[in-house]
Amino acid sequence: MTFIIPTQYQQMIDLALIFVDGIIIGAAIKKGLTSFILMLIGLFIASYVGITLPGVSFELLLSKALNFASYMLSKAPLQFTGLPILFLIGLAIGLWKG
């Protein structure tokens, strides 16, 4: 897909949808990360007070999060090849304003 000024309406609609998709995905990522961080803080405070859930601990979730993050960072170059610049701009705006 080349990024010149499109001459047909379908191309303009596709570019607009790619941009909007980036904004929506960026906002979802921001909300998900915020929720995960708040959950980790809540579990840390609960474990400090002495309240625990069977099989769930702060250390377990933190180790799983670090393992998942290292796995995703190892796959990131493959995930981002071929993404249009408008999607990345929309993703950045969604993360910033979402």
Image (cartoon, rainbow, N blue to C red):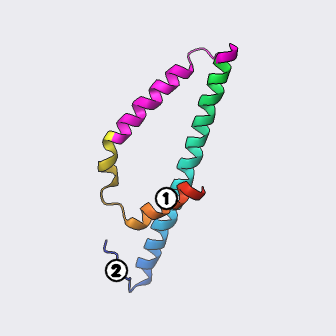
Residue for point 60% across, 42% down: 34
Among the two numbered marks 1 and 2 on one chain, the one whose residue lies closer to the N terminus: 2
Label for residue 20? none
Q: Badge 1: few (under 14), some or many (20 or more) residues near its Cα, within 10 Å?
A: some
Question: What amino acid is at disc 2?
Answer: Ile
The part of the image, by quadrant, that contains residue 24 is: bottom right
**Where does the C terminus fall, quadrant-wise?**
bottom right
Q: In the figure, is residue 33 to the left or right of 15?
A: right
Say if the magenta span includes residue 51.
Answer: yes
**Where does the N terminus fall, quadrant-wise?**
bottom left
Say if the magenta span includes residue 46.
Answer: no
User: Magenta residues?
Assistant: 48-73
Of the residues tagged 1 and 2, which is closer to the observer? 1
Single out the residue that lies furthest toward the bottom: 7
Task: Give percent across and percent down for residue 47.
Answer: 64, 17
Q: Is residue 22 visible?
A: no
